[in-house]
Image (cartoon, rainbow, N blue to C red):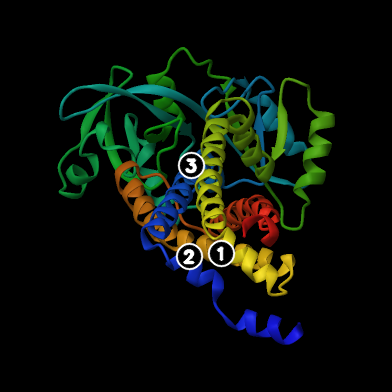
Amino acid sequence: MNFSFIKFRKIPLAWLLLTRQPLRLIVAIAGISFAGILMFMQLGFRDGLFDTSVTIHKLLDADLVLISPRSKSSISMSGFPKRRLIQTLALEDVEKTAPVNLTYLLWRNPENLKTRSILTLGFNPSDSLLLNDGFSIKADKLKNPGRVLFDKLSRPEFGPIEDWFLSERKVETEVAGKRVLVEGLVELGPSFGADGNLITSRETYLRLFPANPKGSIEIGLVKLRSGANPILVSEILNKSLPNDVRILTKDQFIEFEKNYWKNSTAIGFIFTLGALMGFVVGCVVVYQILYSDVTDHLPEYATLLAMGYRLKSLFFVVAREGFLLALFGYLPAYFSGQILYSVVRSSTKLPIVMDANKTILIFILILVMCMGSAGIAMRKLVDADPAEIF
């Protein structure tokens, strides 16, 4: 018995069964690859959404961030008194602060004169806003009224701003119906909430948006002294300041934004559901292939049982078929996903990348999909009774 089992294991039976009908194998690989591509795209869009929603958050030069408790996300910010930010300076660990205004204003495309909402940030040019190298030099140009910095990664619907600026052409347009001059370019990137970004001084911001109270801000940036614990300082400030302001660490501010898109909108759920549907489609395809394979070769399996092979050994054959299908189906899905990710990045400028976590996750999902389907198909082997078949 042991000799027969060893001999049986040396025969690549799983491979021979899969390749016996090449067309069926091609259909199976195509189905699994389609399911894998669908999962790659859905999770890619979902992760791209979360990443782009916090692009600016990650670039803020701050250890703590003050926001209004009524704020829901960057697309729905409420104001709070600027004096709350000044009050944080009473704490020894606070080194400096920076008030920031944030809202959506209408940008006029200087080429076709069409208007489109753009996320606009207003700050004091002498303060530190972003961690970008060389940003402080660009910010100095905002001290003159009516000057703005345009995000060159904004969608093309805002106009050929980068091309005009780099060709030393004067880029002048309207924001909220008032004239502005583009004095420089920054690199931030669009998101699902904002197709483009604009940075200006608080003086210009209040001129563009006069309805905003002068003593009100949407974001307060706090820089701590070296060695200070942001979590501890945020807890102290939350207890000492009135409840009309909320103090978050920078990481908490990033999670605050992500949680809005995850839990308060249907977008995250839709993309996750799309990935789940891809998983289900793949399970159905693999199960049908393996079930048909087991059914077609039921007499052969019965013959092996009659020769003395154990049912457990035959289960391993079907399991190896499932593993091979997972491997062959994953590779085309991975390379196709790389190509599609590149197309999406160039078309939408969203940071959809094939990172290690996503690569491993999809492979595990495809492996579970194939092995699970193989496990269900194994039940048919129980019918391989030599006495009934012959």
Look at mark 2 in the image and give the residue it sits on. 18
Camera-near label (3 vs 2) is 2
Label 1, residues with CA under 10 Å away: few <14, some 14-19, many ≥20: many
As shown in the figure, which amino acid type bears the numbered disc 3? Answer: Gln
Q: Earlier in the sequence, mark 1 or mark 3?
A: 3
Taking the view exactly as shown, the residue that stands out farthest to the bottom is: 3
Give coordinates of residue 358: x percent, y percent: 55, 55
Q: Earlier in the sequence, mark 3 or mark 2?
A: 2
Label 1 to label 2: alpha-carbon separation = 7 Å
Look at mark 3 in the image and give the residue it sits on. 42
Residue 209's place in the image compared with 355, above or below, is: above
Is residue 359 rendered to the left or right of residue 64? left
Is residue 192 rendered to the left or right of residue 249? left
Question: Circles 1 and 2: CB distance less than 8 Å?
Answer: yes
Give coordinates of residue 16: x percent, y percent: 48, 71
Name the one closer to the observer, 92 or 161. Answer: 161
As shown in the figure, which amino acid type bears the numbered disc 2? Answer: Leu
**Quadrant location of residue 182?**
top left
Q: Residue at x 69, y 59 (%)?
A: 387
As shown in the figure, which amino acid type bears the numbered disc 1? Answer: Glu
Look at mark 1 in the image and give the residue it sits on. 321
Give coordinates of residue 199: x percent, y percent: 41, 36
The number of numbered badges drawn on the structure is: 3
Q: Is residue 240 visible?
A: yes
Quadrant in which the C terminus is drawn: bottom right
Camera-near label (1 vs 3) is 1
Label 1 to label 3: alpha-carbon separation = 27 Å
Name the one closer to the observer, 60 or 279. Answer: 279
Q: Residue at x 38, y 63 (%)?
A: 22
Name the one closer to the observer, 386 or 36. Answer: 386
